[in-house]
Amino acid sequence: MLDQSVTAPLISGDNRVSAPLAAGEEVVSAPLELRQNVVSAPVTLGNNRMTASAVVSIGNVSSGDTAAVVDRGVPGAAVLDFTIPKGGDGEAALISIGTVTSGHGAAVSNSGTPSNAVLNFTLPKGDAGASCTVSVGSVNSGTVVSVTNSGTASAAVLNFTLPKGDAGTSATVSVGTVTGGPSALVTNSGTSSAAVLNFTLPKGASGSAATVSVGSVVSGSIASVVNSGTSIAAILNFTLPKGNSGTSATVTVGTVTSGTTAAVTNTGTASAAVLNFTLPKGDAGSSATVTLGTVTSGPTAAVTNTGTASAAVLNFTLPKGNVGASATVTLGTVTSGTTAAVTNTGTASAAVLNFTLPKGDAGSSATVTLGTVTSGTTAAVTNTGTASAAVLNFTLPKGDAGSSATVTLGTVTSGTTAAVTNTGTASAAVLNFTLPKGDAGSSATVTLGTVTSGAIAAVTNTGTASAAVLNFTLPKGDAGSSATVTVGTVASGVTASVTNTGTASAAVLNFTLPKGDAGSSATVTLGTVTSGTTAAVTNIGTESEAILNFVLPKGEKGDIGPQSIIQGPVGPAGSIDLTSHNLFILGL
């Protein structure tokens, strides 16, 4: 080869690029024209001229660690294989739901970016169905989320089972005002979490004066008092046991006071009882009194009334037994009832007296006020007030935090009856929906109203049966761990599908996308080929009519090879074509 160099401009349209073809002192400019990926270049060798067609084809384009272009063709028919390095991993892509609107055709558009997609759905509206109604049935608390329809497809009655979260902030209840009125009424002048209850209590009519008369007094083995009269005209019949010989037991009436609760206490001893009575006060009426008269010893037990029916003075005659062990009297229970009674649940010598005292008409109103509400390990209620003005302090134990619950959409099918079933668990629910299609008619609508947090799960409808507005109150559980969504594989298939090969809280979504019909053939045209520091290929055309511009890095100049000692054959005389695409510019 002579010490010559050839510079050949590549022509694609109106673009021309000069590329060195050989090393030498002489420069020959030869235009190369791209026609259907074929480059024709007239070349001048030595003093002889020869027109030879050079062909450049694009071979394989692959990804690798280092940029490279390799010619695996033959002289005059280059086949260029490109290796393009792959960039580093990008940030995880995000997918969120944008708008969901109704239209004539199904469509999905992305108003976000490729790495932070916001998918907007347009869903076609079906024919108007038969008028259907949706009513809220029962709302219960349970361990598994479920919604069942106890109605029909066109008149659904939805029954909700909602799991209850951990205990939230304690609500408070305080007593506000207590007044008298014609009808019983309770109103809340506070809030739902800090209730202040105001009571209106009706007053009963005054009762007739009660009377107490002594009926029979007999001796027996067990002490008892029986009322053979009525609750307002009592006739008390006494049965008194005779003790063994010994010292006589005495019973003395101590104090008799008025209070809100009936009570009898013994401030003496078992053999010398001093009974103190607290009696509830009844409504105004003629007061009956019972006064202890005399207590004497005699051969026969007897109780006589030296007073009147409404002002009794009771005189007791108690027989003295033989000398023996002392008899004891112990106070048992004191309860309120409609009829006065005293029963002995002990024995004749060790009596345990249980009193039932009739309650009078209502006295002054007692009050109950909520004191403190604290969290502890054991439930407890204490009263730091009084019996008539109680201040209740509550200690409530807190339950352990549960694991985060997940809800995954299972299957959605069409059927005759609306239903939602859970094929998962209480903490990892998989909800399967069966939706009925109604006959043509006016459409019922269900709109989400308010969603608030509360202590008890509830669903209310503030709309109508055919235009329901559902308001949800959901108990709040402990915060769960954040869920993540990662794109797994994206493959081509017959049917579109998305599967999750991860978990409910760390989803890995695998997409199968159906291949569309064959489009029109794309074309690739060579644009410019320039020299630069970094290899690059850019498309200045369109996806279907690509125009590729190449930037190829120039290598260092190589050493001059040895001159051949073999003379090549003399070629035919060259010709000069002065057209715009085959113009030789010869220079020194």
Image (cartoon, rainbow, N blue to C red):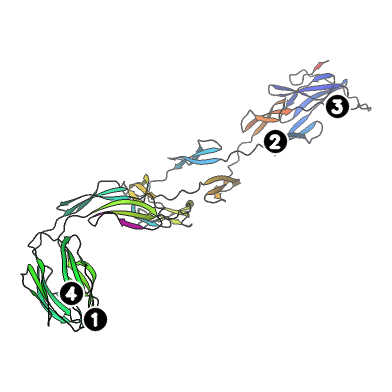
What whole-number distance in Å separates the C-alpha atoms at marks 2 and 1?
A: 116 Å
Residue at the spot of label 4: 250
Residue at the spot of label 1: 325
Viewed as shown, does residue 310 lie left or right of 389? Answer: left
**Residue 124 visible somewhere in the drawing:** yes
Viewed as shown, does residue 495 lie left or right of 20? Answer: left
Residue at the spot of label 3: 559
Image location of residue 290, percent across then percent down: 11, 68
Marks 4 and 2: which is nearer the front? 4
Residue at the spot of label 2: 84
Q: Image height check: is 286 above or below 491?
A: below
What whole-number distance in Å separates the C-alpha atoms at marks 1 and 4?
A: 14 Å
Q: Earlier in the sequence, mark 4 or mark 2?
A: 2
What whole-number distance in Å separates the C-alpha atoms at marks 1 and 3?
A: 139 Å
- Other residues around mark 3 within 10 Å, as few (<14) / some (14–19) / many (≥20): few
Marks 2 and 1: which is nearer the front? 1
User: Magenta includes 382?
Assistant: yes
What whole-number distance in Å separates the C-alpha atoms at marks 4 and 2?
A: 116 Å
Viewer-nearest residue: 9 or 143: 143
Q: Earlier in the sequence, mark 2 or mark 1?
A: 2
Label 4 amino acid?
Answer: Thr
Image location of residue 30, percent across then percent down: 78, 21
Image location of residue 113, percent across then percent down: 54, 35
Q: Earlier in the sequence, mark 1 or mark 4?
A: 4
Label pair 2/1, CB-CB below 8 angstroms:
no
Q: Earlier in the sequence, mark 1 or mark 3?
A: 1
- Other residues around mark 4 within 10 Å, as few (<14) / some (14–19) / many (≥20): some
Viewed as shown, does residue 27 lie left or right of 531? Answer: right
- Other residues around mark 1 within 10 Å, as few (<14) / some (14–19) / many (≥20): few
